[in-house]
Every structure is written in structure tokens, then in C-alpha cells.
Amino acid sequence: MKRAIIAVAAVLAGLVGARAIDLPPAERPTKAGPVVSWGVMNFDSSTLSDNDSTAIAAGGFHSLALKSDGSVVGWGNNSYDGGWIYYGQARPPEGSGFRAIAAGTYHSLALKSDGSIVGWGNNNYGQASPPDGPDFAAIAAGGNHGLGLKADGSVVGWGRNNYGQASPPDGNDFVEVAAGSDHSLALRADGRIVGWGNGDYGQATPPDGNDFVAIAAGGSHGLGLKSNGSIVGWGKNNDGQASPPDGNNFFGIAAGGEHSLALKSDGSIVGWGDNDFGQATPPAGNDFVAVAAGGNHSLALKSDGSVVGWGDNEHAQHTFPVIGSDFVAIDASCFAGPSNERIYDHVLALKSDGCIVGWGYNNYGQATPPDGSDFVAIATGGEHSLALKGDGSIVGWGYDHYGQASPLAGNDFVAIAAGGYHSLALRSDGSIVGWGANNYGQALPPTGSDFVGIAAGIYHSLALKADGSIVGWGAGGPGETGYARYGQAAPPEGNDFVAIAAGNYHSLGLERDGRIVGWGLNTDGQASPPADGGFVDVAGGGVTRGSAFGYWQYGYSLGLRSDGSIVGWGWDGSRTGMNYYGQDKPPGGSYKAIAAGTNYCVAIKRICRYELAGDIDDDCDVDFDDFAVVARNWLIDCYLDPSDLACAPK
């Protein structure tokens, strides 16, 4: 197909004077790209950096933004409270044509320009399955229910209805709807508010009056904005969330779990109520045009179309952990705490300028990298991190009980790897050194100077030799059995390997022909990669989680193909019939780097550049699908405007 494009372009050149032109290369990827994540945490670091958002919505632990082109982006938690059940509430459908958004606790809604509604996320009560119809004018998402305002002024509800919250009153004079945890509100055209659903705290019994112009429903409280610019509140008030400040200069309101926000006429924001996470302490400034309040986080839309957030950010729900398209390396940790504790994941990303950014669990500072712009490689361990500097030295930070974050001195290192509680480094002479926990011998590498690659799991280590063979040490060596010993350190024979990866209790090797081989724990198929080839990189992830019944060990793997697509296999909840995280469902597109953590994955997107036209179908390839634009742009730039310097004869 590329030859056909070149041939047609040559004909066009002949028709306009046979001048030489620069033909579009087949592919021109940049060295850096944006970071994309899926699984429990969902985001694309490039999607909100364009300052083109027009609306925002904050859910229980996730957020949404509507862009000027009618598309929707989401970020934050993608599962049940960061736990074990994947819902996908922060992963909106692709496409444009949307004009309104709403975020519930674990589900989301979007109103299309044709008046129909789409839903996604948790659907246990049908809350993500709105009714059919092209005649909706507004939407609202509550705890486990949804509301739709129709063009004729009537309201419909769906989802959980244990308190009647999804059973709105009759009438066709409504102009706005709002949904709380299990109560609902509607504003009538005459300025009165009606409520229904759970009224244990009086949240479904709004005050009298016919001078309201806006409403908001929080966890168990409500707010009403009056025509004179003042605010009234009602319902649960344990943290003062239903006690708004005095004044009559407000023109926007939002109600969260147990906090509230108001936008003032001068463009500034005030907050009140629960402030345990800082969710009721908005940033200074007077250029805000909209506010949204989630479970324990808050969002604001600025006049320039950018979005800012504050409050609880455990799942990056109030702001993207990284913004931009200048990342060149990525790594994610695999670690879980004891019974009934959250999974502790952190991520590092290396920027093209040599700086490092980090996000995720930070109890030991593992997600707070040092300052500097001279880093060339990164590695994430269980609760510690490493970075390789341009001068060949290593720095470490985070949990250091076993010395795993205290690397050896020297400036002759060329590669690093971080395991559960141990670390490895490859020297320029081909030898390996290790430090940190050594209860299974994982920090005692074999001697030799013919190693070219290293990888570290929780309790085992791997090394790739110059002859293409793999060696392993630590837990899971040949013939070992028992806890943490699953053969993960006993690689297969062969000398055709070009890359290695270590998951928690399984290992992967990439062969020269593009096929992947796996070994070690395989309870979820994590060590059984696809049989076909075409892969250029591999990554292993997983989690060990304590419980009253022992330890649960899950694993999954990722493979990056030569065409930039990602394939996932292994743990998807098949043992329990639930899709826990969705890490086995990578997004479409073209990527250049992958990393697998415990409950979410990260990758760096591949960005292609073309001299004459963009890649229309985003496949990093110029083919017939793109030719129309190529030819059109060439004719406009060169034929209609021969003075264009880019078209000068060569």
C-alpha cells in the first residue's frame, strides 16, 4: 500500500510541474509519548493537557471530563473502592457527540447530542443501563441509581430503588435533576424543589420556597441556590456539609460525600464540611467556571478549559498523576499488604528531560523521587525505588529495612532492577551485584561477566546472558517446593532469548523470533503466553494478598507486539467468575513501552509524526485510509500556494 501512495503522489507532482516533494515516511514515532494506564486506575496523561474541557463530573473515586470535541475522558479508580472487582467506571466509551456527563459512586453516564444516554461501570442494579430514548435533556448519577430529565420536562429513574430514589414524581415541569447516595432532587420551573428516596436525615425534604435556580445532592444532604445568590442546605450535617456560608454572591454549587462547594460570582471557590482529605479546601484563584464534588475529592473547571483537583487522591481521582507526552520509560510495582489492607502500588515515569515523576502509594516515600534531570533508567520494588544516573551511579529511596534502597557506591552501572525487598544492578563489565533482603538467596547473583540483562520478582531474580541463555536464583529454583517456590527461578534451557521479565511468582522470556516463553506459578495462566510471535517486549505483574484463609497469589502478563499493540493474559478473575481489575483488557492504539503492577498497568503511547498529514486511523502507518488527507494537504500547500517554502524545489 505504501508503494501505491508514493506512486500516486508522484503523478500529482508531475501534474503540477514535476517539482520534488517530501513524501510522508511510513512511520515517524517520537522518542517520547504520553502515559496510559488501565485496570484499577485509568488515565491517559495527554487527554487533559490541551485545556479544552467544557464540563466535569466527580464520582465516588473517579472523575470525568467532557472535551470540546464532544469526547469524554475519565481517570481515577476503575474498580470497587480500589479493591477486587473491576467495573470500568473511569473508562468511558470512545467517540464524540456527547454533551453532558454524570458520575455516580461506581458508575457513569453520558448524554449524547441526539438526546440518548449511555452508561458504563457497575451495573449490579441496572444503574449503568439507562432507558432508551432520544429525548433526554439532562442526567444525574447517584449512589446506585440514575435520573434523566426529558425534553418534555418529565423525569425518569433507573437502578437501585430500595428507598424509592429511582421513582420520581409525576409532572412535566421539571428543569433540573440531582442524585445523592440514595435520594433524589428535582427543580421545578416555578423555582420549587421536590425530593424523594431515603429521608433518614431529611435529605429528601427540601425547604419551601419558589426562588431556587439550582440544586445539588450529596451523600445524605442537599443544597439549593436561590435567585438572590444565597445558598441553603438540608439533610445530614455531621460535618457541617449542610451549613453553607452566608452571602448572596454565589452562582454555582456542588455536593459531595460529606462536603460541599460553591462558586462565587468573582470566579473563586469556597468549600465546607468534611475536610479530612482537604476536599473542602479549594485552591485560590478567580478564574473558575464550574465545580464538582465527589466522595472525598473535588474538581474545578477553569476559564481556559483546564481542570484542577484536590482532596483524596489515592486513585489519582482528583488529578492526573502525570500530564503531558514526554515520557520515555515507565515501571510499576507489585506489592500487597496483609489481610484487609489495600494493595500498595506505586509507579515511576522517566521524562525525556531526565526528570522522574512518581505516584501511587507513598507510605515510605517510594513515590517521591529525588530532584534532578540526569536520570536514564528507573525501577520500582515492593515499597522502594531505584534510579540510574547518567554518570553510572544509582540512587534509591523508600522502604529500606533490608537495605534495599541503599545501593552500592560506584559509577559503572548500566542497568537496575528492584524486587519485593531486594535490588540488582548490572555493571559495565557484565557482572551483577545485589543487595537487600536475601532470605531466599535472591540478592546473591551468580558470578560471571557475561550478563546483559536483569529482572527481579518478589523473592527471585533472573539474568540474561550474552549467549541468549537465562539463569535464575532465589525462591523457586530447580526442584524447590513450598511457599513462594513455584519454579519461577528455574528458566528453560535455550540460548535464543533477548529479553526477560519477572512477575511476583512467574517469569517470562522473549525469544529472538518474537515468541514468549513462561514458567513458574501458572494458576491463572500467567505463565502461558499466546503461542504466536511478533512480540518485542514482555512484563509480568500480580499480587500476593494475605487473608484469614492463607495467601492468595494471582498473576498476569503483558506482551507488546511489533505493531505497537498490547496483549494481556492471566489473572482476570476467572477462578471466581469476576473480572477483578481489567488489567487483561489493554486499550487499543499503538504503544512503545509496558509495565505491569498489581492492580493496574501502565504503558507509554507511541506517537507518529508525518510531514504532510496526520495518521487518520491512529495506526502509526500511512495507508490508503490516510491518502485523501495526504493528497488534499499537498495540493493546498503546494499547488495552490507554490510560494510555500516547504514546497521549494529540492
Image (cartoon, rainbow, N blue to C red):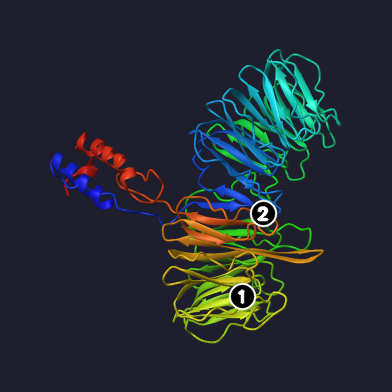
Q: Which mark is residue 253?
A: none
Q: Quadrant of residue 357?
A: bottom right
Q: Check disc 2 and report its element: helix, strand or loop.
A: loop
Residue at horizontal 73%, vertical 21%? Answer: 230
Q: Quadrant of residue 178?
A: top right
Q: Amino acid at mark 2?
A: Tyr
From where the camera sits, is residue 284 visible?
no
Q: Give the x, y percent position of residue 588.
A: 49, 50
Q: Quadrant of residue 251?
A: top right
Q: Give the x, y percent position of residue 297.
A: 69, 42
Q: Amino acid at mark 1?
A: Gln
**Separation of residues labelled 1 and 2 (CA atoms):** 24 Å
Q: Nearer the viewer, residue 1 or 384?
A: 1
Residue at the right extreme of this rendering: 200
From the image, tell me which residue sits under label 2. 580
Q: Nearer the viewer, residue 134 or 279?
A: 134
Taking 11 as reference, is 424 above or below it? below
From the image, tell me which residue sits under label 1. 488
Please say if the residues under marks 1 and 2 sit with CB atoms less than 8 Å apart: no
Residue at the left extreme of this rendering: 17
